[in-house]
Amino acid sequence: MHARHTLHPRRVPLLLATLFALAGCSLAPVYERPAVTTPAAFKEADPALEAAAAARWKAAMPAEDQHRGEWWRLFGDDTLNVLQAEALVANQGLKAAAARLAQARALEGSAHSERMPQVDAGFGPTRQRPSPAAQGLDEDASVSPDTLWRAQVGIAYEVDLFGRVASTVAAAGADTRQQEALLRSVQLALQADVAQGYFLLRELDAEQALFDATVSLRAEALELLRRRFEAGDIGELEVARARTELAATQAEAHGIARRRAAAEHALAILLGRPPAVFDFEPRPLGRITVEVPAGLPSALLERRPDIAAAERAMAAANARIGAAHAAFFPRLTLTGAFGYESAELGDLFQWSSRTFLLGPLVGGMLSLPIFDGGRRPAGLDRARAVYEEEVARYRQTVLEAFREVEDGLAALRLLDARTRAQDEAVAAAERAARLSRLQYREGATSHFEVIDADRSVLQQRRAAVQLDGERARSAVGLIRALGGGWDAERSFSPAAPPPPPGMTETRSARRTR
């Protein structure tokens, strides 16, 4: 005869203590940020410039969930400051990113709720007619239905034996941090887009001013040639050539106006305004030179919000491996119900009507998975594969960040050299134009050469204006690639800055081309 094994009452607290000691033991792998190849310095950085610019800049402390700094103030432009403030308040894309962050925080709160007991209350009757067989009666016996009134409170609590809940909470927290970093990434992108759109508008205004002045000069030259033709001093060919040049310049001016209108509409959308109610008065761009230190590549890993978002995505995927692994182990859920029940509503809350119910197995329910057709192993494999995907995305994001910084550094360095060469080209073209006009007045050359020389001046000046705009936008792009976050002491030298522009809400003062 086999001996009967029973659970001694004094062993129950020991069993419970053991189960609760297991609670919170996470099965997630220990998370470590994957190693990435980080160069000691940026290849395109100028060491002399780095030292000089770093002395005038102070990098904000790395914090991916913080504001990226009002870096645009280094350009010393009050209008740009106003536009940035307006965009941060009214841009709809930024509001959508903020809403996604709010969703992530709500989901994190929902995950945290699983750590707490779930309590609910119920009240109502149940009416039941048991079968005669269940009562041990004859099959034709009469059984009366019974009504039972209940008012009770139910409690359920999952003891986190193997860290399933803890892993879920950790994943939700990492998701929230990821959305915070993505919000800062959207914010930084918006700030850069506003600055670049602003400088594009001003570049087009400078081109428009250049062509407007050229149109006026060519219209005067055409009128002079027309009078000389009427006086019989020159032939009609020179008049026709002058008229052709005037019409071609006017066509170019209309093309610039079309591009400016599109740029203005794009800036209005960034500011959260309908294009119909936004009018930016023309303000030609002067030369702006900024010096932006690249810093160390290792610092980029902490400054870029998109890198921070990718890193938090890895952490969330790592935590979900723990949740998937915990599915292989038992789950202990403590349940209970306390309240009153009575056959009559009037007797429901009598002291004698009180009742309680505890779940089986020492006040709890222990569920042990045995067979599910491979669902849990597949879930664990998927969680691990998702983590590997996030690792690859993180490393690719880092590589792309390094590339963007190198591109920005190379662009500014080469644009500096190109601008110096272009300034020489402008000076040479202007001198050639002066000499051609002098020779024309002395009768040593035809008016055709004057037209060619003037056309060359226009082309070279336009190229110089476009370079100025490209330099300003490249500086913005480099700051964006570095992750923003600068507390900038101004390091700029604008050449002949125009007066601040005015902005209106209507098109009543629409410029005329």
Image (tube, rainbow, N blue to C red):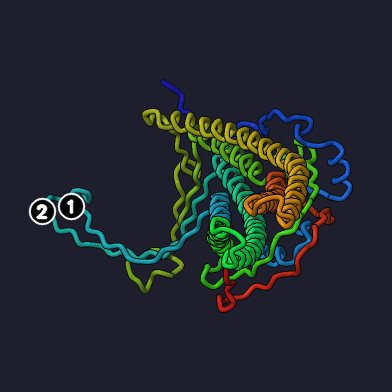
Residue behind mark 2:
140
**In this view, 22 is above or below 446:** above
Callout 2 crowding tier (Cα within 10 Å): few <14, some 14–19, many ≥20: few
Residue 395 image point, x, y percent: 63, 33
Q: Secondary structure at mark 1?
A: loop
Look at the image and tell me in which quarter the C terminus lies. bottom right
Taking 66 as reference, is 387 left or right?
left
Residue 15 showing in the rendered view: no
Pick whichever, 9 or 303, lies toward us. 303
**Upstream in sequence: badge 1 or badge 2:** 1
What is the quadrant of residue 316 in the picture?
top right
Using the image as rendered, state which of residue 331 and residue 150 is in the foreground.
Answer: 331
Residue 1, relative to residue 304: is it above or below?
above
x then y, percent, for residue 5:
48, 29
Q: Residues within 10 Å of mark 1 (few under 14, many from 20)?
A: some
| Numbered badge on residue 503 | none
Q: Position of residue 207 (x, y in %)?
A: 64, 58
Question: Is label 2 in a helix, a strand or a loop?
Answer: loop
Residue sitting at x 35%, y 66%: 124
Asked where in the image residue 261 lies, by quadrant, the reply is: bottom right
Residue 398 makes an appearance in the image: yes
Residue at image location 78% in from the left, 32% down from the top: 41
Q: Residue at x 44, y 59 (%)?
A: 355
| Amino acid of disc 2 | Asp
Image side of residue 163 versus residue 3, left or right = right
Give how far across and how far down residue 329 sits, in percent: 50, 33
Seen from the viewer's position, the closer of residues 220 and 27 is 220
Which numbered dot is residue 132? Answer: 1
Q: Outermost residue, front direction?
A: 232
Whole-angstrom CA distance, mark 1 to mark 2, is 8 Å
Assess whether mark 2 and mark 1 are in contact (beta carbons under 8 angstroms): yes
Identify residue type, mark 1. Pro
